[in-house]
Image: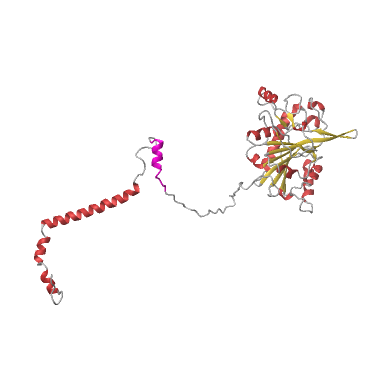
Amino acid sequence: MLLPKGGVTWKSAKARLPPWKAILVLLTRTRFLVSLAVTGLVILLWRGISKSASEMQNFYCYGSSKSPMQMSINEMVEWNAHLQTPVIFNHHEPYEINSSTISNVDLNPIQSTSKAALNQERVLILTPLRDAAAYLPKYFDLLYKLTYPHELIDLAFLVGDCSDDTLAVLSSELKRVQDQVEEKIAFRSALIVQKDFGSNVAMEVNDKHAYAVQGERRKAIARARNYLLYTALKPDHSWVYWRDVDIVDSPEAIIEDFTAHDKDVLVPNIWFHRYEEGRDIEGRFDYNSWIESDKGRRLRQSLDPDTILAEGYKEFDTGRTYLVSMGDWRKDKDEEIELDGVGGVNIVVKADVHRSGVNFPAYSFENQAETEGFARMAKRAGYKVVGLPNYIVWHIDTEEKGGNLGNRKAY
């Protein structure tokens, strides 16, 4: 097509356009209007269908057509193989509690290890007392000689059913130790708990060690131990050291020696000195630390569940092996032997054993009570109960009658 020489002008362009009447006729034709309406309808329908499909994506179920209860393992694996569940991490800011009535205790860092002193582990020494005034000065003489850091040791005592001056002497001795000028002498803290249980067993040797009173006596001592334990045990204690008041000699590093074994429950051998005709007789004292025997197991099966066996008496022959019947302080002090029963003169326990609910039954537990029942309970809970036959702690000589031991010699 040839363009005018002068270029494209409005006049030339207008001459080429169809007449406006012809355009009007075209636009008003029925065929054109119908085509326009159909095209608009198609566009509207298409837009509506596309939008609905887009919205339906939010509700589309990607699950199998079968119920999970109807799918086989292979079908379940095949379906889940392609799934990638989106995970949204919503990290919250720390929540601050400002209330004097709410506190938090984290027991996770509290451990009982073989390097207790190095790890600054706190030790709780517990001693139940009844008519013990005469023993307390010697008790504290030994206590403040302990080489374990005193700032890591808490002391706690239960005074109950006393007829002597135990409370006053105890208070005086505690003040004597805690007021020492040297900082290494004073202990971290001291607690005195007073609780009477109504025990009327006389404290004379022949009375309190007679077989007939052993059941009630052991139950009363068990209650005293439990009251003391639950009153004094704090969240930061790693070890509990049960120490009787009538110990007359023990190694100064006994806490370090015992924690180094890293055992749940650990006891030494308990002996005593008896002087006769100028001779120093090394006597065996504690028959409550023992290894069970087949004879003892058969005996227990024949007993009423409420019967409490008191070891070391001729009334019941259990055939058990006693810790006091073995060992020698001249041999390896770290030799270990597993036990089934323990005496209460000197026990070192990991605090978590007590926290787990292992205490001193004031009732018949597997026909044992107090410390022997405690050992039974600890073993039932899966803890190790161990004795050191060559590690000796010396007890006061109670001058017991030989009859209480049956055919077993006191020395």
Name the spot of residue 179 as percent of width and height, x first. Answer: 78, 51
* Residue 251 seen by the camera: yes
Residue at image point 67% right, 22% down: 302
- The magenta span reads 71-85
Q: Nearer the viewer, residue 137 or 125?
A: 125
Q: Is residue 180 above or below residue 206?
A: below
**Residue 218 in the figure: left or right of residue 63:** right
Residue 298, quarter of picture: top right
Quadrant (top left, top right, bottom left, bottom right) of the C terminus? top right
In the visual, does 133 lie left or right of 11?
right
- Residue lying farthest front? 1
Residue 388 image position (x, y, % from top left)? 74, 37
Query: Residue 76 appears at what percent x and percent y?
Result: 40, 39
Residue at horizontal 24%, vertical 52%?
A: 46
Q: Residue furthest right?
A: 277
Residue in the picture at 77% in, 34% down: 327
> Quarter of the image holding residue 394?
top right
Q: Nearer the viewer, residue 176 or 279?
A: 279
